[in-house]
Amino acid sequence: MPEAFVPSAWLYQQVSLEEIEKSADLPVPADSAAWTAFLAQMRPGDQLWYFISPPDTWRHLAGRLGYVILRAGQQVAQMIIMMN
């Protein structure tokens, strides 16, 4: 498991790259090089999930949202898109 991981309770929705690119509701990373490197870690059969931390984390200036790659149910990579 990666050094930093996202609690499974934060996993909000499984998404596809197409959904991210077409949706006005899903955040798109500002750093395209980092996003490309993140996506390069995906392998056939992997799942891409959108995550968001609970509301109380945002109230306490510890909120996070982003994406996680799951492989056989285990996190292999995560990318934080927004934090406060």
Image (tube, helix red, strand yellow):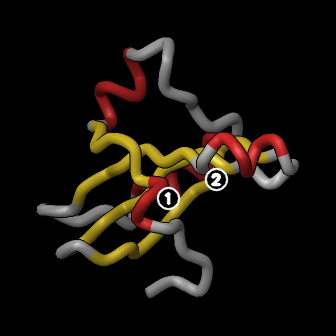
1, above or below 72, in the image: below
Which one is in front in this view, the residue at disc 2 or the one at disc 1? Answer: 2
- In the picture provided, is 33 more to the left or to the right than 83? left
- In the picture provided, is 60 more to the left or to the right than 7? right
Q: Quadrant of the C terminus?
A: top right
At x 48%, y 54%, the residue is 10
Numbered mark located on residue 19 in the image = none
- Outermost left residue: 45
- In the picture provided, is 47 more to the left or to the right than 59? left
At x 29%, y 27%, the residue is 18
Q: Secondary structure at mark 1?
A: helix
At x 32%, y 25%, the residue is 19
Question: Given the image, on which type of amino acid does mark 1 rest?
Answer: Phe
Q: Secondary structure at mark 2?
A: strand
Residue 46 percent across, percent down from the top left: 21, 62
Residue at numbered disc 1: 38
42, above or below 71, in the image: above
Q: Earlier in the sequence, mark 2 or mark 1?
A: 1
Foreground of the two, 6 or 43? 6
Numbered mark located on residue 80 in the image = 2
Residue 5 figure quarter: bottom right
Q: How would you rate the neighbour count of disc 1 (Cα within 10 Å): few for under 14, some for 14-19, many for 20 or more?
A: some
